[in-house]
Image (spheres, rainbow, N blue to C red):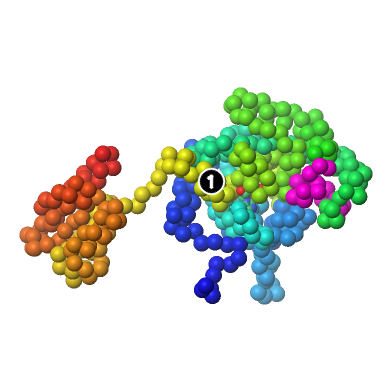
Amino acid sequence: MPQLRAPRGTRDLLPDDAARFLRFAEVARGLTERYGYRPIETPLIEQAAVFERGIGEVTDVVEKELFRIAPRTEESEAWALRPEPTAGIVRAYVQHGMQTWPQPVRLTTTGPMFRYDRPQAGRYRQFWQFDVEAIGDPGPAVDAEIIELGLRFFAEVGVQGAEVLLNSIGDPACRPAYLEALVAFYRGHAAELPPTERDRLERNPLRLLDSKDPAMAALNAVAPRTVDHLCEACAAHFAGLRRHLYALAIPYRIEPGLVRGLDYYTRTAIEFYVAGREGQQQALGGGGRYDGLVELLGGRPTPGIGFGLGLDRIALVLDEQRGTAEAAGPGHHDAPDAVVVSADPADTVGRLRIATELLAAGLRARADLGHRKLGRQLEAAGRDGAHFAVILGDELAEGQVQLRDLEAGTQRAVAISDLARELKRGASQHRHG
Ligand code: AMP
């Protein structure tokens, strides 16, 4: 076992996985472009206060899972690696005065997030999210739009059976009364509460509802539900969302225990699952409305909604469903159009020069840079899946090469000046043939 390894909870995305993540990112880019989202990149590090304020200090994400960066000097501020993208994007929205842009501002990003969590299957310390945020629209139509976008992403990457869980968790008008009811309920069952939950009850009672402790399941099944305690405005919002989803023929399930771990959520709470995999570790994505967040981070009161989809978990689900979805999905193959080989094993200059010309013409070409016999070079080109081999031999002096169709096994002389054009024609025939 080598001594130097990727840190615990992180992993290398080797070419197959990295190519797959790129494909997810391409699907995300294509979709979000069509839906009117513009790309944004915020730093992977932020002032820790962005997360402490924006996510809430009494949350697992900030209390236990934040990757803090120790300041190097007295004057430098405390930073942290981003555990999720929303707080940073909203910080940027405020910092750059995006409230003066046409609203809503639709933003998207795809990249790594960091949480100092106990590593296990589907739970990493560095993981990737595809994220969208629509800031400046109170909904509920945009809530439905964003849910539809999430489902379309799953469909386009080939995930089968993605489902939406939905809840409304109220707003500052109705939450206090709800929390009172919730706290009273749990106090009435104090003896049944595990110690960590009893401690949380005083600090963030909402968290008990999505507790991972199996001892809480029975209790939570009969706990007061947010949807039964919504104020009139929140109830109307939720009804509006359901009406829009109905009109779009989007099925969903109301999940009263869905309160999301982050403090800034109001009203709509969303989670994406694949049927049969519902469980704490299994959510493929989540999001919701955060009408209080812009103000919390120093901006004017502005509503917003967004979601983050976990690409690592999506890859795991696709692996499980492999053989159906993935085989049918748009595959990538990196086979070169042509490999340039030569009769003279030492002539790497000639091979590299021709290959460079083909690359400049936009072809997928590569030179065989080994010093081996022509037969071995041709074998290697075949193993790479190349459609053609360009063979440099004696005719090079007359400006000619041999073009060998490796699949058909045929070969003919071609002028170097015609080579790129011939290869393009041949490559497109192969692709469509
Ligand atoms: P959250 O903000 O916790 O709801 O996360 C949104 C999505 O990101 C989840 O539904 C997961 O798909 C993914 N995710 C969150 N934490 C992790 C993690 N530690 N490892 C892998 N994926 C994660």
Tell whether circle 1 marks a residue whose Cβ is less than 8 angstroms from ligand 1. no
Q: Where does the image place residue 145, in percent across and percent down from the top left? A: 59, 34
Q: Where does the image place residue 420, in percent across and percent down from the top left? A: 20, 51
- The amino acid beneath tag 1 is Glu
> Can you tell which quarter of the image residue 339 is in?
bottom left
> Can you tell which quarter of the image residue 63 is in?
bottom right
Q: Nearer the viewer, residue 393 or 86?
A: 393
Measuring 49% from the left and 51% from the top, which residue is drawn there? 21
Looking at the figure, which quarter contains the C terminus?
A: top left
Q: Where does the image place residue 356, in percent across and percent down from the top left? A: 25, 60
Residue 415 placement, left or right of 383: left
- Residue 388 belongs to the span the image colors magenta: no
Classify 414 as above or below 165. Answer: below
Classify 160 as above or below 14. Answer: above
Label 1 neighbour load within 10 Å: few <14, some 14-19, many 20+: few
Query: Dominant secondary structure of the magenta stretch?
Result: helix
Residue 162 placement, left or right of 406: right
- Residue 208 belongs to the span the image colors magenta: yes
What range is drawn magenta here? 198-219
- Badge 1 element: helix
Would residue 385 be seen by someone viewing this image from the given angle? yes
Measuring 15% from the left and 49% from the top, which residue is drawn there? 410
Residue 324 placement, left or right of 383: right
Residue 288 placement, left or right of 221: left
